[in-house]
Image: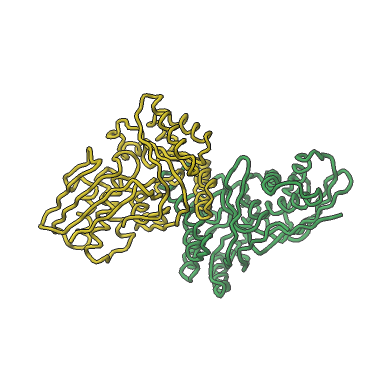
Chain colours: A yellow, B green
Amino acid sequence: MSITIRAPATIANFGPGFDVFGLALEGPCDKVRVRLRGDEIRIKLSGMADGVPVNPPDNTAGLAVINFLKGIGEEGMGVDIAIKKGIRTGAGLGSSGACAAASVHALNKLFGSALTPNRLIEFAMGGEAASGVTHADNVSACSLGGFTIIKNFDPIAVEKVEVPLIPIVICTPLVHLQQRKTAATRRVIPASFSLMDAREQISACSSLVRAMLDEDLIGIGRAVNRDHISEPVRSMFIPGYWEIKGAVLKAGAYGCNISGGAPSIFAIVEKEEQGEIAELMVEGFKQRGIESEPILTKASNRGCE
Amino acid sequence: MSITIRAPATIANFGPGFDVFGLALEGPCDKVRVRLRGDEIRIKLSGMADGVPVNPPDNTAGLAVINFLKGIGEEGMGVDIAIKKGIRTGAGLGSSGACAAASVHALNKLFGSALTPNRLIEFAMGGEAASGVTHADNVSACSLGGFTIIKNFDPIAVEKVEVPLIPIVICTPLVHLQQRKTAATRRVIPASFSLMDAREQISACSSLVRAMLDEDLIGIGRAVNRDHISEPVRSMFIPGYWEIKGAVLKAGAYGCNISGGAPSIFAIVEKEEQGEIAELMVEGFKQRGIESEPILTKASNRGCE
């Protein structure tokens, strides 16, 4: 018997919510098919799988499966993992987290759905360690769908907020994605913050949660624009970021920021403006000699399924 | 014509929301009567007014009135301000903010209610400068009632969240209150924070806003317990704080923390447990040779009125 799970791309941080907020997108998605077989873990890759490791302990899905089997006392069991990558890797769209989340959700189904969502998120996070980071924001949003808040780090506890219709434009500059690993862009974040930055961040995050629960698109956008932790440093990895953000906001977007570990940028817009904003972003990168890929999508309440 | 405004005590920070969150209480309250008369500002004090300055520029209400008149171009106008203090000063219950907020709300009524709530909060904050600090969390909650989130600092913009029934116990240790000025307990807060503290604080604040909107008393209490900014340092000014907090939580309180600039502590409890928790707090201070004053109250959606 095999189980196939669809796992959506996600925007980690979602502006000010460093390591805490995640948002599930309608697409793109990875698809992961899992089957119990033999006594080895084998990975098969297809789709946008350039540079994705096929050796199980180096692959986020493979490592998540190893963790899962260890966790339930079934080490040594064989698993075939067929991954069809729809989410570009190294783009800051939760690609590694999606594979990891999908594979543990599939295994959990095969084993009778005995584990809690928080436990699955922990196994998936363990899998993410293969990509050099362990944080729960991508795998949480990917697992549960909607807007997720990490309410406890150890052990992981996550709550989901149902999202309204939030049209989103994403643009991924296609440069040196291999070097743009999350681990690298994370290291540049300062180890400490001023009291003024801390209260600004608290204010932005609190306003964002309130706006999300009120389904207030303008309030969501405004809060997304306010980040004193990630954006000031990760923007340095994105040529023309501030000019493009400025143009996008001037054209009517409610908010614009960097998705997860960069370099993708995202904007919150009205549905009818998605095309125009996407063009602005692509044009902004083009002026700097950079090819980019736009995605027109929206927030989604669907997680791994 | 005179206008009398009732201004409630408030809990600033409300756990993790440093400088951002405020909660209005049903009581205690200050009452401020304002009348336009002559060409001087005169202050009359009654109630628990020990140590409250009567010289207008040194008094938070007096300074707020001076700011207000200047702001609307009516400098030189005379105002009688009669303040009946129901809120103990120097207790961390927003006493100075309440006088300031009440006086500008009263003046605004006398002048035809032309100013916005955010503008009144700014004038009241200016008044608070007389007590050595300018932050908007107390005056915001006092002005609007309910649970308030500062969503912008400059210019001040505040949003109000309607609160559910939250029974609260407050206990004020009656020691050296004169030395416990907010300005002093604020100086000891570190100027910088680690990345781990920042994400913990973001998580706690976001969870608290969510719990408040969900009217989830347990979630509110849990989030109130999590503060990495104010509690670690201000607790040093409260003898026995951690032991008392431990006992209060063990007895069934959902959350316990320090109110504003200390030394009052507050707990979130079930209504029928208010008496028992209050006794625990008083007993805890008594064991350390400290008299204290308990208050049984609850969150309130009423602000200055």
Image coordinates for residue B178, horizontal then vertical, percent = 66, 53
- Residue furthest left as drawn: A38
Identity of the residue drawn at 44% across and 47% down? A17
Identity of the residue drawn at 40% across and 39% down? A170
Task: Look at the image and tell me in which quarter the C terminus of chain A lies.
Answer: bottom left
Find residue A115 and report its image quarter: bottom left
- Residue furthest right as drawn: B38
Q: In this view, does B198 lie above or below B264?
A: above
Image coordinates for residue A42, horizontal then vertical, percent = 14, 50
Q: Which of A113 and A299 is in front in this view?
A: A299
Q: Nearer the viewer, residue B182 or A16?
A: A16
Residue B240, can we see it? no
Find residue B167 and report its image quarter: bottom right
Image coordinates for residue A264, horizontal then vertical, percent = 37, 37
Q: Is residue B32 above or below residue A256?
A: below
Q: In this view, does A207 lie to the left or right of A60?
A: right
Image coordinates for residue B279, horizontal then vertical, percent = 57, 72
Identity of the residue drawn at 47% across and 51% down? A165
- Residue furthest bottom as drawn: B272
Task: Look at the image and tell me in which quarter the N terminus of chain A lies.
Answer: bottom left
Residue B110, can we see it? yes
Q: Is residue B109 left or right of residue A32?
A: right
Q: Nearer the viewer, residue B230 or A21?
A: A21
Q: Which of B131 and A253 is in front in this view?
A: A253
Q: Is residue A251 left or right of residue A114?
A: right
Find residue B77 and report its image quarter: top right
- Tell me how many marks there are: 0
Q: In this view, does B205 lie above or below A46?
A: below
